[in-house]
Image (cartoon, rainbow, N blue to C red):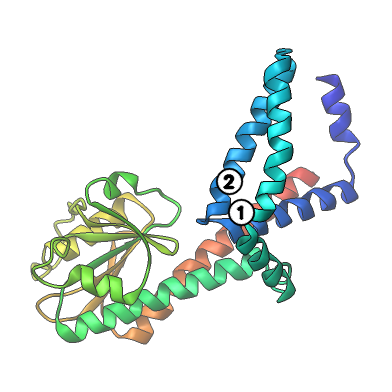
Amino acid sequence: MQQFMELIRNIGVRDIADMAIVAFVFYKLYMLIRETRAEQLIKGILVLLIATQISDWLQLHVINWILRNTMTVGLIALLIVFQPELRRALEYIGRTKFLTKSIVDIQDEEIRMTVDEIIEAAGSLSRQKIGALVVIERETGLNEVVETGTAINGKISRGLLINIFMPNTPLHDGAVVVRKTEIMAAGCLLPLTDNQNLSKELGTRHRAAIGITERSDSIVVIVSEETGAISMAEKGNLKRFLDIDSLKALLMDAFKSDENRQWQFLKLKWRQKDE
């Protein structure tokens, strides 16, 4: 424990910068190989490395020898089998996007893309007077809601959202849960609000939207089946009769509030650390 504390005290600004750069590079590499064959290969290599180290600790010499030679051959096989992935990675680095696009830029792009897809789908559904209920997860997890529906786990798009809410389809009668840039599930059940002061003209769809925002920090976009009117629920409050521009502004403001809150939290932590 004393050696660990001594190590912590000896860490300087250069060490922190060094670790941050390495972490950033590994993050970029992971984003590059995510959902490809190379991702599964990396997991396999990690398992072999762990097994090799364990066999060395336990002095299992035969197993250790086999694993070490397997790793040597495996590195050569890696270059051959995954030549397309390696070429794609080098091309990606060559386009200078590997280190120039920050994590903040990626997050901003994800937010804009998610908002654009949702508002375009809402506008189309509104013109056709097709009811819709889109729940956007924020900091509070909604796994219990996701489990009540049918798993989608697909990248969000206006086409997919529109198809889900088309009448007489299996998943149209329920809510869609969106997490970052993915549609997690459709046909989900939401808790109804207990607020007795709501207008009597509000139906189950709007009451469910208010209900989930009372129990979490999620945002819900609602399209009325009767009138085609677009509404947004947040923190138990309902904003009705929105046009596309107003909806986009409200959604972007909500996400920017999240970013500002996170930034204020980080500044507070750093201030407390300095004190």
Q: Is residue 227 visible?
A: yes
> Can you identify the residue that label 1 sits on?
81
The reply to whether discs 1 and 2 touch (Cβ–Cβ < 8 Å) is yes
Residue in the foreground of this view, choosing between 238 and 122: 122
At x 74%, y 38%, the residue is 72
> Can you identify the residue that label 2 sits on?
41
Residue type at mark 1 is: Val
Front label number (1 vs 2): 1
Q: Secondary structure at mark 2?
A: helix
Vertical position of residue 166 compared to residue 22: above or below: below
Marks 1 and 2 sit apart, C-alpha to C-alpha, by 10 Å
Where residue 128 sits, quadrant-wise, is bottom left
Quarter that holds the N terminus: top right
Q: Secondary structure at mark 1?
A: helix
Vertical position of residue 67 compared to residue 129: above or below: above
At x 69%, y 25%, the residue is 66
Residue 99 percent coordinates (x, y): 73, 67
Residue type at mark 2 is: Leu
* Label 2: few (<14), some (14–19) or many (≥20) C-alpha neighbours in 10 Å: some
Vertical position of residue 201 compared to residue 64: above or below: below
Residue 17 percent coordinates (x, y): 83, 53
Residue in the foreground of this view, choosing between 29 and 8: 29
